[in-house]
């Protein structure tokens, strides 16, 4: 309520009645509670079949399917057809969406004429009387009209609500009634229709001068190769694969045995890498994911490690992670150990934490994984003595990965040793502590990093002058940790 009452100013001394205050507004109406609808069992079973994992279709997202399902059930409920529709025979929403997409490529566009527009029977739902879904037309199939009377009316739309009145249940122009034409209204309407025929005239269809493109072939599911050639070069796919150029699984198994024998005999990495990439491509286009697929990726990853090709190794390691999750066999603990060592090389702490979190208790006790975890722990604690001892005892092919960052760790250890041992240090001690095979290899390592002037021979022994070389090894250590040169990422 306002704090004051508005009154009009007095123009004379006559008495005016007091204007009463306006009545208070009525209270807002309470919204009506929606009554709970009882859904038939057939509808519930239909919804369960829609969300079943076996009925999912690639390319149709869950959100699209839910929107389509909601539309089907809502329209059936609004038209009281929940008990009429045969929900057991009704196609699933994802099947309807896929069929509509297929019709988009297969069905040519339809241009509706004026006679066809007048005969169209627009339904309020996409369910017919027998419960089967009717095909939805696209927006370019026809132009919808807002009212059924507008489709048959001879008048243009802008005159439909102005000069027309109802006479004997039909629309008649006012001028016909005033001029006494009401008795012969049909003939007057026919005359008016003829005058406006030009509005319904259809323009001549556009004829393209380009040749008609063939309808695209819709292929479903993986292909099955028919090629019988064992060796095939790798080509990057720019079009759908041709079954005549894809080798089936039995041929691929023979190809793998041939490649293993050629690798042991010729050791030609360029040829072997190209053949393995072609083999992996044939497995991918045919959706072959078996134990044989795991074997192919593991062999290619080991060969890439041996040759230091981190790009191909990372591609194989990425696919192996997905294949191991499907429990297809192979050697998952071996490649998980490689993954930990790889993250030691890249100094990627975030991915290292993720890899450690994925390990189970049984995997942590596996020899290869335990070795990788010990190497990580020794570097984290700065225990170089233990790290280089583990370097000399690396199982499987992990030594190829450790070779990529052992020089960096040796520089860090030399920087610490130059600060701790003064004034000099025996070269033999450096060889044993940093995992060198001989004193000659240790001296060569020191000379490669500019320390040849700090090596002196005394009493038949080669000694490293640590007091003067500390700054040199410290700067070399910082440069080694500044950038990691690698190709590709996992």
Image: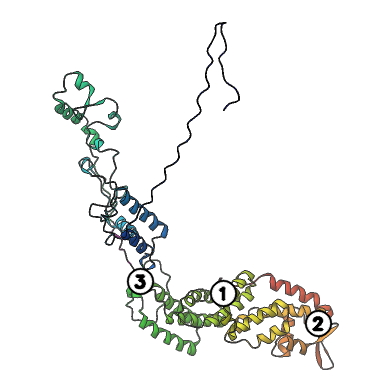
Label 2: which secondary element: helix
Task: Read off the magenta span.
Answer: 213-221
Q: Nearer the viewer, mark 2 or mark 3?
A: 3
Tell me which corner region of the image, top left, top right, bottom left or bottom right, holds residue 178.
top left
Q: Nearer the viewer, mark 1 or mark 3?
A: 1
Outermost bottom residue: 460
**Label for residue 222?**
3
Q: Earlier in the sequence, mark 1 or mark 3?
A: 3
In which quadrant of the rendered image does the C terminus lie?
bottom right
Q: Is residue 222 magenta?
A: no
Q: Earlier in the sequence, mark 1 or mark 2?
A: 1
Tell me which corner region of the image, top left, top right, bottom left or bottom right, holds residue 353.
bottom right
**Label for residue 454?**
2
**Label for residue 358?**
1
Residue 113's x, y, as percent?
Answer: 22, 42
Residue 158's x, y, as percent?
Answer: 30, 30
Residue 170's x, y, as percent?
Answer: 20, 30
Compute the Cα span from label 1 to label 2.
47 Å
Q: Is residue 436 left or right of residue 218?
A: right
Q: Is residue 317 above or below residue 61?
A: below
């Amino acid at each position: 309520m306002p704090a004051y009452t508005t009154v009009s100013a007095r123009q004379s001394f006559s008495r005016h009645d007091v204007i009463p205050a306006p009545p208070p507004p009525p209270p807002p109406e309470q919204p009506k509670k929606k009554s709970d609808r009882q859904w038939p069992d057939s509808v519930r079973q239909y919804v369960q079949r829609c969300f079943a994992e076996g009925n999912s279709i690639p390319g149709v997202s869950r959100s699209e399917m839910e929107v389509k399902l909601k539309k089907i059930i809502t329209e059936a409920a609004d038209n009281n057809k929940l008990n009429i529709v045969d929900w057991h025979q009704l196609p699933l929403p994802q099947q309807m969406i896929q069929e509509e997409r297929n019709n988009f490529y297969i069905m040519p566009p339809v241009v509706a004429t004026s006679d066809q527009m007048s005969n169209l029977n627009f339904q309020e739902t996409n369910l017919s009387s027998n419960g089967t879904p009717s095909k939805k037309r696209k927006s370019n199939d026809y132009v919808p009209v807002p009212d059924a009377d507008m489709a048959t009316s001879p008048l243009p739309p802008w005159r439909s609500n102005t000069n027309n009145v109802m006479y004997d249940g039909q629309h008649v122009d006012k001028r016909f009634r005033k001029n006494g034409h009401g008795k012969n209204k049909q003939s007057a309407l026919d005359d008016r229709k003829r005058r406006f025929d030009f509005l319904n005239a259809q323009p001549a269809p556009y004829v393209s001068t380009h040749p008609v493109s063939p309808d695209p072939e819709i292929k479903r599911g993986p292909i099955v190769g028919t090629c019988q050639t064992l060796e095939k070069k790798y080509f990057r796919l720019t079009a759908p694969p041709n079954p005549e150029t894809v080798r089936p699984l039995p041929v691929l198994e023979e190809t793998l045995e041939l490649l293993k024998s050629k690798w042991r005999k010729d050791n030609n990495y360029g040829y072997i890498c190209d053949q393995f990439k072609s083999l992996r491509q044939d497995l991918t286009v045919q959706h072959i994911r078996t134990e044989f697929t795991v074997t192919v990726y593991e062999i290619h990853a080991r060969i890439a490690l041996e040759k230091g090709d981190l790009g191909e190794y990372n591609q194989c390691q990425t696919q192996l992670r997905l294949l191991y999750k499907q429990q297809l066999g192979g050697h998952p603990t071996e490649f998980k150990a490689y993954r930990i060592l790889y993250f030691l090389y890249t100094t990627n702490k975030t991915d290292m934490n993720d890899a450690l979190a994925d390990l189970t208790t049984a995997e942590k006790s596996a020899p290869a994984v335990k070795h990788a975890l010990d190497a990580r722990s020794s570097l984290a604690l700065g225990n170089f003595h233990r790290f280089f001892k583990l370097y000399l005892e690396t199982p499987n092919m992990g030594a190829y990965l450790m070779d990529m960052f052992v020089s960096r760790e040796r520089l860090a250890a030399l920087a610490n040793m130059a600060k701790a041992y003064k004034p000099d240090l025996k070269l033999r001690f450096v060889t044993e502590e940093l995992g060198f095979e001989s004193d000659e290899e240790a001296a060569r390592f020191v000379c490669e990093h500019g320390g040849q002037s700090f090596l002196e021979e005394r009493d038949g022994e080669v000694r490293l002058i640590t007091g003067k070389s500390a700054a040199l090894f410290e700067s070399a250590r910082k440069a080694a940790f500044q950038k990691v040169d690698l190709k590709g990422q996992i």
